[in-house]
Image: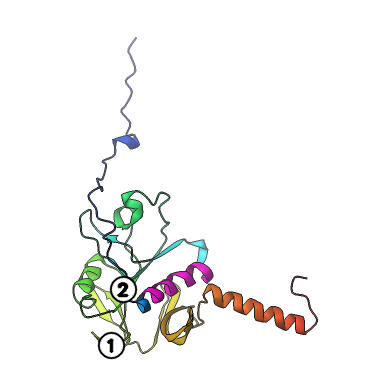
Amino acid sequence: MTESVLEPTLESTDLPVVETAHLITEDDEPVDNLFSEKQQRLLTESLYTSWKGPRDGRPFLVTANVGLFMVNRNPAIVPDVLLSLDVVMPEDWWTTEGRSYTVWELGKTPDLIVEIVSNQKGDELGDKYHKYEQMRVPLYVVLDPEQQIQDELLAVYALNGFGYHKLNVVDSCRFPEIELGIKLWEGEFEGRRAQWLRWTELDGTLIPTGNEQRARAERLAAQLRAAGIEPDA
């Protein structure tokens, strides 16, 4: 009687471990100016509050001032805002990998990055531009409120072959591939009137913030009551 020989199996514990403890995920640097901070929140909050997301219920992740690691070494590049479809926020965001956007963990580069120019030291059209290009980030948006590094307030670059191609943009742009658009919008956000960058649906409709959603609901309720209809009914 011969003994059966069990073939070795590859257990999850046999997979190579990627050491990430050396990665610097926070550098304690202060945030940018007040406009940049509010602009970043406007772009992140409105999507999570009001955007239904791309069709078929695909997940998405939008972040502000979070480190982006393409490879397992320092330093990270830190976009003002990044949007990535078909990725899910890590369950444990206290691990090194969970604190940042690590491409090898999430499986892809972001779909769109927005940089907000605060001064001439950010190198948004230099080092950052070339790094995003090398990472193959499909869409790169540069908002320059004071036109410090470019002639226009808004510039959009799309990956074309091996490099970026500047799109012909005045104050808005549509991105059918991610089912979103952007536009410059003059209005009030959190008590401050300015020209902001906003997300839109592909038809140009603004994606509202939470406050805008509530204000609309209150106006509708008031109109219904004026017509003798109780909204809750």
Tell me: 26 left or right of 88: left
Q: Main secondary structure of the magenta part?
A: helix
Residue located beneath label 1 in the image: 147
Q: Quadrant of the N terminus?
A: top left
Q: Residues within 10 Å of mark 2 (few under 14, many from 20)?
A: some
Q: Magenta segment range? A: 37-53
The first of marks 2 and 1 along the sequence is: 2
Q: Secondary structure at mark 1?
A: loop
| Amino acid type assigned to the residue bearing label 1 in the image | Gln
Q: Secondary structure at mark 2?
A: loop
> Label 2 belongs to which residue?
32
Q: Is residue 211 left or right of residue 91?
A: right
The spot of residue 91 in percent (x, y) is: 43, 50
Q: Is residue 25 above or below residue 1?
A: below
Q: Is residue 85 visible?
A: yes
Q: Who is closer to the viewer here, 196 or 130? A: 196
Depth order, front residue of 9/104: 104
The quadrant of the rendering that contains the C terminus is bottom right
Whole-number angstrom distance, CA of label 2 to CA of label 1: 16 Å
Whether label 2 touches label 1, CB < 8 Å = no
Residue 121: x, y in percent? 20, 77
